[in-house]
Image (cartoon, grey):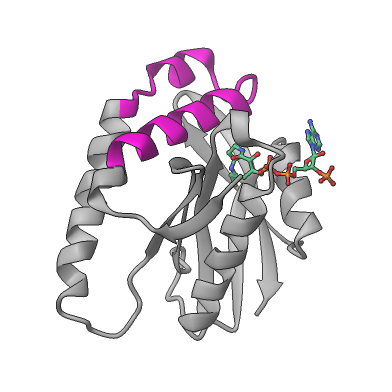
């Protein structure tokens, strides 16, 4: 089985939309409302990704310092099954703090190791951005993701926040890692 992790390209957008929606609809069933989850739509997510990746491609032609997010995809046997984004910490002036903005793996590829490979490259990119450390936010009841991060050395740092997603208030906890 061949796996690779690489930078996302604009023509990955349709698959990225599908992976994103499939991961959310499995992982967050019972945590977010059915109405919100059922309203997620892969083509709409794909348009979001196409816009973000096209803008990133244009900016890459005029390099200006390396604080842009990195959008990555993981492939198994030539198909994109996993997506991740890293960049500067978004909640306050970032300084040298990076953030794993998101990681989503298509449910049929959970437990295959592609998530570990993708997280490894994502962390390498944060190191390449000269981040001294990184954080991520995860829904407190998302136990599979929490176990995954803990297995790879991330630890809760005591911060939490309430967020409204659809019509449901959820609690997110912050994890941190030194780089
Ligand atoms: C989070 C995610 C990227 C992890 O990838 P993965 O391939 O599932 O990860 P792994 O299988 O390597 O690790 C998951 C761990 O959780 C464990 N686990 C599985 N189901 C679990 C459950 N219900 N409760 C607690 N732990 C669970 C697994 O056994 C595994 O631990 P182990 O290797 O020590 O046995 C993937 O599950 C995903 O995309 N989820 C949906 C989106 C998401 O939640 N993203 C993160 C948002 S912050």
| Residue 158 seen in render | yes
* Location of residue 176 with respect to 74 vertically, above or below: below
Which region of the structure is painted magenta?
13-42
* Spot occupied by residue 89 in the image (x, y as percentages of width and height): 48, 68
* Residue 61, picture quadrant: bottom left
* Spot occupied by residue 95 in the image (x, y as percentages of width and height): 47, 83
Q: Give yes or no for residue 24 being in the magenta stretch.
A: yes
- Judge by depth and name the residue closer to the eye, 108 or 147: 108
* Location of residue 155 with respect to 78 vertically, above or below: below
| Residue 28 seen in render | no
| Residue drawn 46% across the image and 81% down it | 129
Side of 57 relative to 175 (left or right): left
- Judge by depth and name the residue closer to the eye, 1 or 85: 1
All told, the count of numbered labels is 0
* Spot occupied by residue 12 in the image (x, y as percentages of width and height): 31, 44
Kindly report the secondary structure that dominates the magenta region of the rendered protein: helix
Q: Give yes or no for residue 35 being in the magenta stretch.
A: yes
| Residue drawn 35% across the image and 55% down it | 8
* Location of residue 59 with respect to 84 vertically, above or below: below
Side of 111 relative to 115 (left or right): right
* Location of residue 18 with respect to 85 vertically, above or below: above
| Residue drawn 22% across the image and 37% down it | 47
Quadrant of the displayed image that contains ligand 1: top right
The quarter of the picture where the N terminus appears is top right
Side of 25 relative to 88 (left or right): right
| Residue drawn 73% across the image and 63% down it | 154
* Residue 178, picture quadrant: bottom right
The quarter of the picture where the C terminus appears is bottom right
Side of 58 relative to 109 (left or right): left
* Residue 107, picture quadrant: top right
């Amino acid at each position: 089985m061949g796996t690779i992790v690489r930078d996302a390209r604009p023509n990955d957008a349709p698959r990225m939309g599908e992976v994103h929606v499939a991961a959310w609809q499995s992982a967050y069933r019972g945590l977010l409302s059915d109405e919100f989850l059922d309203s997620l739509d892969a083509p709409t997510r794909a348009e979001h990704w196409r816009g973000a990746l096209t803008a990133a491609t244009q900016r890459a032609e005029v390099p200006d310092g390396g604080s842009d997010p990195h959008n990555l995809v993981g492939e198994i046997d030539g198909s994109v099954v996993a997506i991740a984004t890293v960049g500067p910490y978004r909640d306050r002036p970032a300084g040298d703090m990076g953030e794993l903005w998101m990681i989503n793996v298509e449910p049929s590829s959970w437990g295959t190791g592609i998530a570990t490979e993708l997280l490894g490259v994502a962390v390498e990119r944060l190191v390449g951005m000269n981040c001294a450390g990184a954080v991520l936010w995860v829904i407190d009841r998302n136990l599979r993701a929490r176990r995954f991060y803990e297995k790879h050395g991330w630890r809760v740092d005591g911060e939490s926040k309430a967020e409204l997603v659809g019509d449901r208030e959820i609690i997110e906890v912050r994890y941190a890692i030194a780089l």
